[in-house]
Image (tube, rainbow, N blue to C red):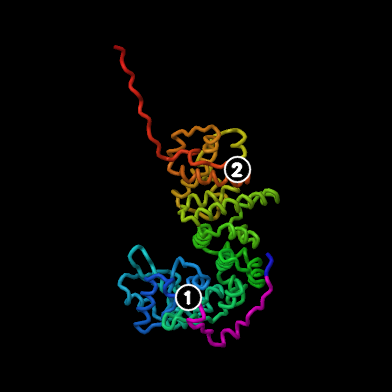
Amino acid sequence: MEATIVEQPNLFLLKRRGPTIIPRPEHCVSRKDMDREALKVLYRLKDHGYLAYLVGGSVRDLLLGRRPKDFDVGTNATPRQVRRLFRYSRIIGKRFRLVHVYFRGRKIIEVSTFRRQIEFDDREAARLGLSENEIYGTPKEDAFRRDLTINGLFYNIADFSIIDYVGGMEDLRRGIIRTIGEPSVRFIRDPVRMMRAVRHAARTGFTIEPATWEALEQHRGLIRLCSIHRVRDEWLKDLNSGKSAAWARLAYRAGLLQELFPAYWQGLDQDQERRVLHLLEGLLKGLDGLISQGETVDEPLLIALLVMPRLLTAPEWLALESNKLKWPTHEARGLLMEFLAPFDFRRAVQDAAAQILASQWPIGLCYARGNWPKRVVNKPTFESALELYKMVRDVVRGEEAVTVHSSSAPSKRRRRRRRRKKRGKA
């Protein structure tokens, strides 16, 4: 990856000096762009004498002129103190305790307590007999615990200022993705941070600075040591981000995509790998288009789309095309889980995704013949399978793809024709 050479900030000096305070007239973050529920939480904490900051990605997105999906709050109030302030709230989390405050319409505001830079999560701290004073800390300590400098910014509801302990405002201005602290140390302690560095570079179009990129390439194999469920949730989030094509391209260059799905790339020569990557990027661009239009893409279609480029090079699929055979759903499920190993999904999700994949050949035949049998149309996954078929066809055919009109494929619901009764002879 080509990276712009930028000066590495001195972490020791950052920790010794005070925060950079950006007053309200000098930044673009406005309360009118925040959720009303987030403001209610911030003001109630402030009115009861606690520090109340908007933290993390919400501050970053507001500074970039984007609408955050979630608004997270940081405070010096402990989870129990937060719980007492909000009637409809609950303390959650096994590794790190925090509070979810609930509002109407299934709105949730996440409130976390500023933490110290300790190597233990809450469960380990409890076993070691550490007190809350040894776990929770100051805003400054909490800022240096975070992953990237652009995610370490705070918005103070008391005076509407931005508080920057880690040099995040400068990196935001210059378009730089940088870890807080030594990249190798940060990635070794939590390899999932590598995924987040790639994610934010893809979403923002920023450049990963050289030291962070080199550490990512060096330690990418450590991602296999993380919780499978945690890593799976991270890449599913990337697929649903609306920037999945850029994410996949950057993750592949870093070698992270190959570490996430080793079986996916196994057995491919250089030409096959290049073709699979081309198909994957093309399908993900189609997915990004759907998401940008406000479409909701369910999990079975996501993983079927992810597997489809690799499936097109599998001997089973090639044999299916040459012999014109029907492909059983259970065989599709087997290849699906083989290529996505070691990740697992609920059986219902596996079955639905396998049915989407197994339906690709029948749908192709239906298009060719112009005939749509009920056994194809009435399947519960028909709409998703048809969407995937269109995207695959457009990527494979490129500019020569035939435009599909709305009348080319039937809707799932079709009116039954009434049979005319034969009139008896007089």
| 366 over 230 or under it: above or below | above
Label 2 Cα neighbours within 10 Å, binned few <14 / some 14-19 / many ≥20: few
Image position, residue 29 (x, y; %): 48, 75
Label 1 is placed on what type of residue? Val
Point 55% across, 55% down: residue: 342
Judge whether residue 7 is colored magenta: yes
Give the image quarter of residue 20.
bottom right
Q: Is residue 3 left or right of residue 380?
A: right
Tell me the quarter of the image containing the C terminus: top left
Label 2 is placed on what type of residue? Ala
| Count of numbered marks | 2
**From this viewpoint, is residue 228 visible?**
no
Q: Earlier in the sequence, mark 1 or mark 2?
A: 1
Tell me the quarter of the image containing the N terminus: bottom right
Image position, residue 78 (x, y; %): 39, 79
Q: Residue furthest right?
A: 270
The residue at which mark 2 appears reads as 401
Label 1 Cα neighbours within 10 Å, binned few <14 / some 14-19 / many ≥20: many
The foreground one among 274 and 334 is: 274
Image position, residue 400 (x, y; %): 63, 43
The residue at which mark 1 appears reads as 29
Marks 1 and 2, how far apart at CA: 45 Å
Write down the region rendered in magenta.
4-28
Contact between labelled residues 2 and 1, with CB atoms less than 8 Å apart: no
